[in-house]
Amino acid sequence: MRLKNTIIIVVSCLLAGWGGLVSAADTNNGSKLYAQFCQNCHGSNGAGQIPGAPDFSRGEKMLQPDTVIVDSIKTGKGMMPSFRGQLTVNELFDITAYLR
């Protein structure tokens, strides 16, 4: 069973890479997108401008895996609106890389 799961994971990763789904995040693009979509609420330095917004400058929420952060941006959380349909998955990872 373990070997089967390992093979499935390896094949999935290879197919994702061959399908062009794997790419390096672009922090420069992430910076531009952050300024456009995030800065009003989270501040230019990530300190948070509205109640309940995490303070990225203090590392709040930054210990989460990239996929959790991307999902939070995509689906919205609390007062934060969803950005599904406005940002691509690659753009979401760009913002996450910029935050880190």
Image (spheres, rainbow, N blue to C red):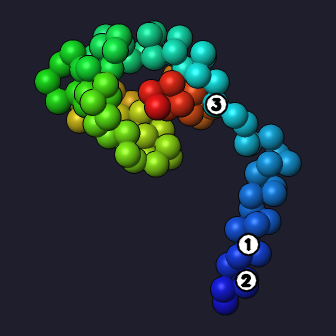
Callout in the foreground (3, 1): 3
Amino acid at dot 2: Lys
**Which residue corresponds to mark 3?**
25
In the picture, measured across the screen, residue 43 lies left or right of residue 97, that is left
Q: Secondary structure at mark 1?
A: helix
Cα separation between marks 2 and 1: 6 Å
**Quarter where residue 40 is shown:** top left
Q: Secondary structure at mark 3?
A: loop
In the picture, measured across the screen, residue 44 lies left or right of residue 13, that is left
CB contact under 8 Å: marks 2 and 1: yes
In the picture, measured across the screen, residue 91 lies left or right of residue 100, that is right
User: Taking 83 as reference, is 16 above or below it?
Assistant: below
**Which residue corresponds to mark 2?**
4
Cα separation between marks 3 and 1: 25 Å
Amino acid at dot 3: Ala
Amino acid at dot 1: Ile
**Quarter where residue 54 is shown:** top left
Cα separation between marks 3 and 2: 31 Å
Q: Secondary structure at mark 2?
A: helix
Picture coordinates of residue 77, whole percent (x, y): 30, 37
- First along the sequence among labels 3 and 2: 2
**Which residue corresponds to mark 1?**
8
Give 85 or 97, whichever is nearer the viewer.
Answer: 97
